[in-house]
Amino acid sequence: RAKSAGGNRFELADPEADARAITRHGLTTALPAALERGEFFIEYQPLVHLGDGSVRGAEALVRWLHPQHGVIGPDRFIPLAEHTGLIVPLGRWVLEESVRQARTWEARHKDAGPLRVNVNLSPMQLTHPGLVSDTVEILERAGLEPGALCLEVTESALIGADDDLLKPLRRLAEMGVDIALDDFGTGYSNLANLRRLPVSILKLDRSFTQGMQHFPADPVDLKIVEGIVALAHSLDLAVTVEGVETGAQADQLRELGCDTAQGWYYARPGPPDQLHELALADATS
Ligand code: C2E
Ligand code: MG
Ligand code: MG
Ligand code: MG
């Protein structure tokens, strides 16, 4: 037990917290070299149309293959990269790699409908002055049309956003890039505020889907989702749901009018070929 200097507050010695702190620090300092050495890779999780079950694209989810610790998930290192600013070059790499991948799906899969790619953007990338020009350049270099790209921005990153923050997103939306509001329903955004955001897709957070795990689902939960879907559609926004783990959830969400779904019920995040195979299976079924 250590008493903090001068105060009457006690801090418990917590060896686990120390270990975590060291790891955090260790991971943080290892990030730049990891990017240079190519230790990051991307998994793609299919996005499925709830109406007909067809695969429409995938969300790009970055992972770190650490030489000592194995695969590390983004929840552990994205906040660190955000903190140090490394998220800007890392995010640019994710975008470039995902756009290139989407172009490859397109080329290998001419007969099916277009396969789109969703890429997550961190708050710091939003304020980076190169966002629009980098994105344009990356799309042009890969030869991918802007409509095949969707950028996901969390609701919390846009809460209280002023016009300066929204301007680059507006530019991208005008070019045809879709903007999705990620983790929708976890923040405290004013629903009326949705009108000023240049978004075309709401991604309903996994917590809503989890509320439907039990049968019968809580009628209040259902009413809330129904209300959000109605509002979204009245504003011309499509609704994607995250974290669909069972067929019963998928049925329920389809009935509630959701447009697109993503979750383990359909597929876990996986290598780029998984998407190609699923899309191919669609085309031949
Ligand atoms: P997100 O954008 O909300 O992504 C969805 C997360 O839900 C992913 O976690 C995905 O693997 C997980 N998931 C998908 N289906 C299911 C399901 O049925 N059940 C459950 N329990 N989970 C499911 P993941 O891959 O660990 O990513 C976590 C977060 O890290 C993402 O949340 C996103 O905010 C962030 N992230 C991932 N890649 C990037 C990136 O390239 N850039 C930035 N800035 N953030 C990223
Ligand atoms: Mg996302
Ligand atoms: Mg999400
Ligand atoms: Mg989420």
Image: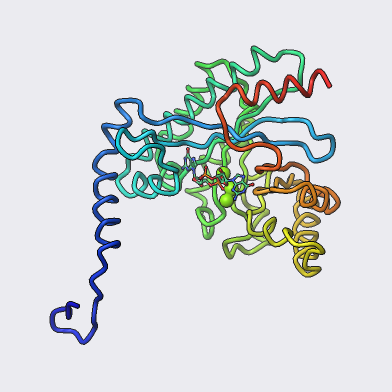
* Looking at the image, residue 28 lies above or below residue 58: below
Which quadrant of the figure has residue 70? top left
Q: Give residue 191's quadrant in the image.
A: bottom right
- The residue at 74%/44% (across/down) is 238
Q: Pick the residue in front: 44 or 103.
A: 44
Counting from the top left corner in percent of width and height, residue 217 is at 78, 64
Q: Residue furthest left?
A: 5
Residue at (25, 50) in percent of width and height: 25
Which quadrant would the C terminus be assigned to in this image?
top right
Residue 187, position as x, y percentages in the image: 57, 62
Q: Nearer the viewer, residue 255 or 67?
A: 67
Side of 11 where 244 appears, left or right: right
Residue at 61% x, 36% y is 173
Picture mark count:
0
Q: Please state which of residues 121 and 17 is positioned toward the viewer in this rendering.
A: 17
Choose top left, top right, bottom left or bottom right for residue 44: top right
Q: Position of residue 121 (x, y in %)?
A: 49, 41
The quarter of the rendering in which ligand 1 is drawn is: top right
- Left/right placement of residue 269 relative to residue 129 reads right
> Which residue is found at the position 61% from the left and 41% from the top?
179
Which scheme is used to colour this image of the protein? rainbow
**Left or right of residue 171, residue 78 in this image:** left
Q: Position of residue 245 (x, y in %)?
A: 69, 48
Asked if 113 appears above or below 12 in the picture, the reply is: above
Image quarter where the N terminus lies is: bottom left
